[in-house]
């Protein structure tokens, strides 16, 4: 017997900020911190905290560098992140009846 | 926005769609920027390939060195400018760029191999310019128009 769709939901994405971050990153190859901040509409500290959590879980890869003398941070989904989030979205669609 | 509020599945899907749409709007700039970069790089590479037909290293080594040096300076300058302005890239655009780049580079290598055949005339030189520049330029046009 297959598990109910709600059991396939990933708790790592239940937080609204993390869900939006994963959704935003799914639409791009890579995005910088400022673009993510504007897209998701959160403060630097909130974004930083959730990006670090997603990185620790292996869903996001963070790259730090410099443009001129200014530090800049870019983020992208890992293949694990792509797969885990696709499964989470599919479970959401199954629950809501959107297939 | 309440950052910690739990959402039901329908709310999650709506929030997800909204985040994706916001990011797609934000990454239009990235698409156009990479498109312009591709067009300029394609034109530079095509021009280098065509000029090497005119200034062959065995016949005009000084001209060859100057042209190659100018090319390197131009590529470094546009790459630095791109790096400064780059913020995000729509999904799949890295692969699209690499495809155009490698096709242009392969045609550039063919053009370099043609140098050993001697001077082939202005028509071949013009065709070389077009053939080498086309893959990157067309890739760039596709990106800018999207």
Image (cartoon, grey):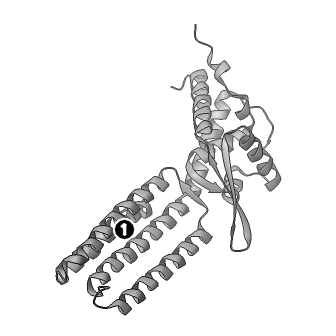
Q: Residue B104 is drawn in which quadrant?
A: bottom left
Q: Given the image, what chain letter belongs to the residue carrying mark 1?
A: B
Q: Residue A5 is drawn in which quadrant?
A: top right
Q: Is residue A9 above or below residue B88?
A: above
- In the image: residue A45, left or right of residue B68: right
- The x, y position of residue A71, in whole percent, is 74, 66
Element type where label 1 sits in the image: helix
Identify the residue at image location x=34%, y=79%: B47
- The x, y position of residue A82, in whole percent, is 58, 38
- The x, y position of residue A3, in whole percent, is 62, 13
For residue A17, say whether it is visible.
no
Identify the residue at image location x=80%, y=47%: A49
Q: Residue B1 is drawn in which quadrant?
A: top right
Furthest toward the front, the residue is B58
Q: Is residue B60 above or below residue B138?
A: below
Q: Quadrant of the C terminus of chain B?
A: bottom left
Furthest toward the top, the residue is A1
Front in this rendered view, residue B130 or A50: B130
Q: How many marks?
A: 1
According to the picture, the residue beneath numbered tag 1 turns out to be: B137
Front in this rendered view, residue A94 or A54: A54
For residue B36, say whether it is visible.
yes
Identify the residue at image location x=72%, y=41%: A54
Mark 1 Cα shell of 10 Å, populated few (<14), some (14-19), many (≥20): many
């Amino acid at each position: 017997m297959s598990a109910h769709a709600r059991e396939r939901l990933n708790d790592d994405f239940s937080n609204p900020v993390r869900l939006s971050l994963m959704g935003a990153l799914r639409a791009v190859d890579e995005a910088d911190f400022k673009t993510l901040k504007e897209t998701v509409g959160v403060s630097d500290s909130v974004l930083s905290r959730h990006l670090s959590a997603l990185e620790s879980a292996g869903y996001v890869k963070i790259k730090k560098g410099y443009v001129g003398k200014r530090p800049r941070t870019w983020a992208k989904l890992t293949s694990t992140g792509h797969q885990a989030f696709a499964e989470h979205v599919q479970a959401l669609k199954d629950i809501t009846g959107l297939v | 926005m309440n950052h910690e509020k739990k959402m039901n599945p329908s709310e999650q899907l709506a929030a997800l769609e909204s985040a994706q749409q916001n990011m797609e709007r934000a990454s239009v700039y990235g698409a156009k920027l990479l498109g312009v970069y591709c067009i300029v790089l394609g034109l530079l590479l095509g021009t280098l390939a065509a000029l090497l037909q005119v200034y062959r290293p065995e016949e005009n080594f000084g001209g060859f060195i100057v042209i190659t040096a100018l090319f390197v300076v131009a590529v470094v300058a546009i790459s630095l400018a791109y790096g400064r302005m780059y913020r995000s890239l729509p999904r799949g655009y890295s692969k699209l760029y690499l495809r155009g780049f490698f096709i242009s580079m392969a045609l550039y290598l063919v053009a370099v191999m043609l140098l050993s055949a001697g001077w082939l005339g202005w028509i071949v030189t013009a065709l070389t310019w077009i053939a080498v520049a086309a893959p990157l330029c067309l890739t760039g046009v596709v990106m800018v128009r999207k």
